[in-house]
Amino acid sequence: MTHLLNKSRNRELPEIDLILCPGDLSDKADASALDHAWNFLINLKAALGNPTLVNATGNHDLDSRFAKTDFDPKGNLFGLAPSYPVVLGKNDTIGQQKEQQIRLNYWARNFAIFYHQEVRIVVLNSAAFHGYGVDNKEYEHGRVSKRTLDDLRAQLEEDQKNKGRPPLNIIVFHHHLEADPDVDSQDNPDASVMVGAPQLTELLSKVKFGPWLAVHGHRHHPRLYQKGGNSGPIVLQAASFGATNQHDYQNRSPNQIHFVSLVSG
């Protein structure tokens, strides 16, 4: 990784506005791996000219099965520095929410909204209820609750009254909105789709809020599609940067990142 960063300093790279990471910085809540991956992202951010870094929590970032603690599945994430899940960059304007307010909203309301220039960004915690409901294995899937959706809708409407409709929205979360037809089958069914995905898709499809790019992880298989009809979000299902096919046997697309250029208008 150090070699990669050193090479990046000696090459002419495109200007990067945002680094989006849709979760699973670690594997099975390994604290040392989490610290290592977070430090790598912070160093990468510096090497790329200090863009804004946006993270969403993955199921492997939480000790949902209480293998290493019996009461605090989120503790390792709270201990990261700079504070997780968003580290603002050089182009973020003075009037925006600061990192601490974003952090508090993310953990208290399961989402946070902020602006990068004129683009509205939502970071959503689809693993918010992991570590609860042990008997029904909540940790096996994602969830966006009705309360979270109601709060998100109200915040978007209030935000729009004050700032108007943005030219572009980006939402980042970990779990997926639908099963992947290229990966899932009757012999390999998918049970980890986000509960509440249809309701979230419906919210993101409302024309009044403007166009959306939704970025998520979890499947380790890259895919680009539109969900929810003509006004629905464009969905980037991200590949995995760190997983290898030696330890992730169904992963046909290991060690990938995506460079995305967006033009509003």
Image (cartoon, rainbow, N blue to C red):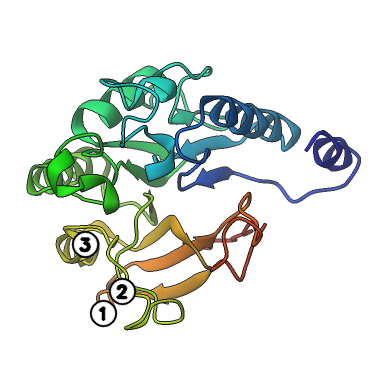
| Spatial separation of the CA atoms under disc 3 and disc 1 | 14 Å
Is the residue marked by circle 1 packed among few (<14), some (14-19), or many (20+) residues within 10 Å? few
Q: Disc 1 on helix, strand or loop?
A: loop
Tag 2–tag 1 contact (CB < 8 Å): no
Please give the name of the residue rendered at 57% of the width and 59% of the height, measured from the top-left corner.
248
Which residue carries the number 2 mark? 227
Residue flagged by tag 2: what amino acid is it? Lys
Which residue carries the number 1 mark? 229
Q: Disc 3 on helix, strand or loop?
A: helix
Which one is closest to the eye, mark 3 or mark 1?
3
Please give the name of the residue rendered at 39% of the width and 77% of the height, measured from the top-left corner.
184
Residue flagged by tag 3: what amino acid is it? Ala
| Spatial separation of the CA atoms under disc 2 and disc 1 | 6 Å
Residue 161: image location, x then y, percent: 17, 42
The C terminus appears in which quarter of the rendering?
Answer: bottom left
Q: Nearer the viewer, residue 153 or 187?
A: 187
Please give the name of the residue rendered at 53% of the width and 17% of the height, measured from the top-left corner.
81
Residue 241: image location, x then y, percent: 62, 52
Does 70 appear above or below 51? above
Which one is closest to the eye, mark 3 or mark 2?
3
Tag 3–tag 2 contact (CB < 8 Å): no
| Spatial separation of the CA atoms under disc 3 and disc 2 | 10 Å
Instruction: Say whether residue 182 is left or right of residue 10.
Output: left
Which residue carries the number 3 mark? 197
Does 254 appear above or below 137? below
Q: Nearer the viewer, residue 190 or 262?
A: 190
Q: In the rendered image, is residue 100 in sight?
A: yes
Instruction: Say whether residue 21 is left or right of residue 127.
Output: right
Total labels: the figure holds 3
Residue flagged by tag 1: what amino acid is it? Gly
